[in-house]
Structure formats: structure tokens, C-alpha cells
Image: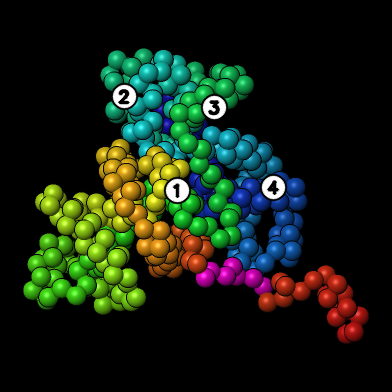
């Protein structure tokens, strides 16, 4: 990598892409403390956790730099957790705040961002500001306490977002846990579902007119969604038709239409009691989509019916869980399902006293 930056060791890339912070930290601490014997700790966790942790521990144990590599990895995760929110924000929002910062501060902020964000920001910063940004080598010479102060001040421009996603039963208020691309997948699916609700009961001729506007894959999915609809309330049906007619009047392309209908459906589910969720989701979207979501929410806030909003929220949660089950988003999001039950070992419910008694009897 240019600018004097070190290449990311394979273990760092593997750990970053493989698991959430909690599991990565557990694996790194185990190997740091017990070395090759870290796998013995797997005897004390559930079978599900064993499957998740074993490959991470194996990767850590195989690192040729041993304890030093684990120390760097643990420090990196701690730093990332402190400054994690900013990496979850869409770079276009970050760009707006960076434009008012001095070049040296811009360089320090860029140091803490994912490479995809850095590429976007360097491409879109005003040329005069971009040309004055110092190289990465200079930013690494800044004292840690100064860097921490700058990070906290800049991050205060945004709502804080958790990155350690260890909640067993997430609800709609945790929807921002989804990564940007996962959120996009959900919104498209919400668009298809909303269209299916709106089009249910229409004539075959009218349906074919809509199908012809979509690509073949989306048309087949829409047809399947219509056939699979069950128990939709009349008010939800009416709302969905309104949402579709509002978007249809803009003469948008098929991809954009699905995204816009999905945003309208999401806005109808959020309601007035989840204002922070709306802002958190906005941070992860391109500004054009974020502003559209905000407008939809503001328009629907006065006419929202609590019972229908609750019906919609259940649909959103079940849709997230289904996407996770199909492997289209991270499988851990199956826990969004209202009836989700975490996997446990068969004897996980037995107490230590029960175990002791059974051993004496045997």
C-alpha cells in the first residue's frame, strides 16, 4: 500500500470479515492467554458457539507472529469499538462534515475509516482541500490522546451506533445493526412485499402490466409474494395501494421504484415512537434515500394507526429473519424472527447441581 502504510496481515483480514467483535475478541484473548491450548476452552461453550469460535481460534493460533499479532489485533478491536459508529455511516454524510475541517484533521479522520470510505472521500473532497491533506505517515505520529479527542469530537456529529451485536432477541429498534448492503437488500424485499400487498386481488391483465415493468427475476419474486400472502388487514391493503400509487406517479425505473416503495413501507412501520431508529438508518443510506425516508415518515406520522404499524413491524422482522435463513444477509439475523429460539446444547439447561447428582448416582 502506498504512503508508507503496512499491508493488513491475513489474520486481521480474516478476523475482520468472519465474525462480530465479541467472537473475534474471545478468540484473540483465548489464544493470547493459552496459545495452542486455547481450544480446550471450547469444552465450556455451547455447540453453536464452538462452531463459531473454533475456526477463529485456529486462524489465530496459526499466525507466525503469535502473541504480538494477538496484542495488535486486540488493540485494533478496542480502537475500532471506540470509533465504530463512524465506519457505519454512509461516506456522503461524513463528507459534508469533513468539508469544514482543516486538512490535518481530515487526514486523521481518514486514518480511522474503512478503505472504501477513504476512496469515496478522497474522490469527492473539494480539490483544494484534498491536495492539502497530509499523508498517512504524518497522521500516525499524532499522540494517542490527541487522536482520541479528535475522534470523539468528530463522531459527535452522528448518532452513536453499536457494533457489538450480541443481543439475543433484536427488535425493530435494532434494525440499524444491518450492514449497508443488507439494509439495501431488505428495502428491496420490502418493496416487493408492499407491491404484492397492493396488487393482491387485481386482474391478471393489470398484474401483467406491472410484471412487464420489472426484470424477470423480480417479476417472479413478486408473483410468488402475491400467491403467498395471508391474513393482510384491509387497512394495510389500503396503505400499500396508496404507497404504490404515490411512487408509480414518478415514472421511476424498476430498481428505483422497488427501493422507493420499500422506503415508503419502512416509513409506515417506523411510526412516531422510533424517531432515533429513523435517524440511525438515515446515517447508513445515501443522502437522497435518507431524505426520502424522512419525508415519508413525516407524511405518515399524523395518519399512523398503531395497530397497523404493529402489523407492519412484525412483517419487517419476519422478512429480516427470512433473508437471513436464505443466506442473503448474515445468518445471525435469524434472531429477528419473533418466535426465534437460540440454538443450545441438549443438556444446556441442566444446572451444575443436577450434573453433580447424576454423576453420584451413576
Residue assigned mark 1: 274
User: Which mark identifies residue 152?
Assistant: 3
202 above or below 122? below
From the image, state whether disc 2 or disc 3 is nearer to you: 3
User: Which mark identifies residue 29?
Assistant: 4
Is 67 or 75 nearer to us in this picture? 75
Name the residue rendered at 50%, 20% in the picture.
139
User: Which mark identifies residue 125?
Assistant: 2
Q: Secondary structure at mark 3?
A: helix
* Residue 343, magenta (yes or no): yes
Question: What is the C-alpha distance between the residues marked 2 and 4?
Answer: 39 Å
Q: Which residues are magenta?
A: 339-345
313 above or below 17? below
Residue 17 at what x, y percent from top left? 49, 50
Residue 161 at what x, y percent from top left? 50, 41
From the image, state whether disc 3 or disc 4 is nearer to you: 3
Amino acid at each position: 500500500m502506498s504512503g508508507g502504510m503496512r499491508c493488513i496481515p491475513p489474520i486481521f483480514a480474516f478476523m475482520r470479515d468472519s465474525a462480530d467483535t465479541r467472537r473475534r475478541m474471545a478468540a484473540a484473548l483465548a489464544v493470547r492467554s493459552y496459545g495452542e491450548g486455547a481450544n480446550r476452552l471450547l469444552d465450556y461453550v455451547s455447540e453453536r458457539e464452538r462452531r463459531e469460535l473454533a475456526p477463529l481460534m485456529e486462524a489465530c493460533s496459526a499466525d507466525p507472529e503469535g502473541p504480538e499479532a494477538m496484542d495488535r489485533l486486540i488493540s485494533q478491536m478496542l480502537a475500532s469499538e471506540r470509533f465504530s459508529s463512524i465506519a457505519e455511516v454512509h461516506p456522503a454524510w461524513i463528507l459534508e462534515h469533513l468539508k469544514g475541517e482543516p486538512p490535518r484533521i481530515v487526514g486523521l479522520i481518514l486514518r480511522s475509516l474503512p478503505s472504501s470510505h477513504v476512496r469515496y472521500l478522497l474522490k469527492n473532497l473539494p480539490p483544494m482541500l484534498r491536495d492539502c491533506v497530509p499523508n498517512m505517515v504524518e497522521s500516525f505520529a499524532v499522540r494517542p490522546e490527541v487522536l482520541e479527542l479528535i475522534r470523539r469530537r468528530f463522531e459527535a456529529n452522528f448518532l452513536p451506533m453499536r457494533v457489538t451485536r450480541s443481543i439475543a432477541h433484536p427488535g425493530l429498534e435494532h434494525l440499524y445493526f444491518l450492514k449497508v448492503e443488507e439494509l439495501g437488500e431488505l428495502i428491496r424485499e420490502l418493496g416487493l412485499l408492499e407491491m404484492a400487498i397492493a396488487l393482491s386481488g387485481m386482474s391478471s391483465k393489470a398484474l401483467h402490466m406491472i410484471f412487464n415493468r420489472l426484470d424477470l427475476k423480480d417479476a417472479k419474486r413478486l408473483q410468488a409474494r402475491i400467491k403467498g400472502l395471508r391474513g393482510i388487514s384491509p387497512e394495510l391493503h389500503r396503505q400499500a395501494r396508496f404507497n404504490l400509487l404515490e411512487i408509480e406517479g414518478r415514472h421511476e425505473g424498476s430498481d428505483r421504484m422497488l427501493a422507493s416503495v420499500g422506503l415508503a413501507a419502512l416509513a409506515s412501520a417506523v411510526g412516531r415512537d422510533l424517531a432515533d431508529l429513523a435517524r440511525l438508518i438515515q446515517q447508513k443510506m445515501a443522502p437522497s434515500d435518507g431524505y426520502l425516508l424522512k419525508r415519508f415518515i413525516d407524511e405518515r406520522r399524523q395518519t399512523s394507526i398503531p395497530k397497523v404499524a404493529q402489523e407492519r413491524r412484525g412483517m419487517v422482522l419476519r422478512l429480516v429473519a427470512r433473508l437471513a435463513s436464505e443466506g442473503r444477509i448474515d445468518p445471525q439475523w435469524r434472531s429477528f424472527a419473533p418466535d426465534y429460539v437460540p440454538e443450545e446444547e441438549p443438556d444446556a439447561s441442566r444446572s451444575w447441581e443436577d450434573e453433580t447428582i447424576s454423576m453420584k448416582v451413576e
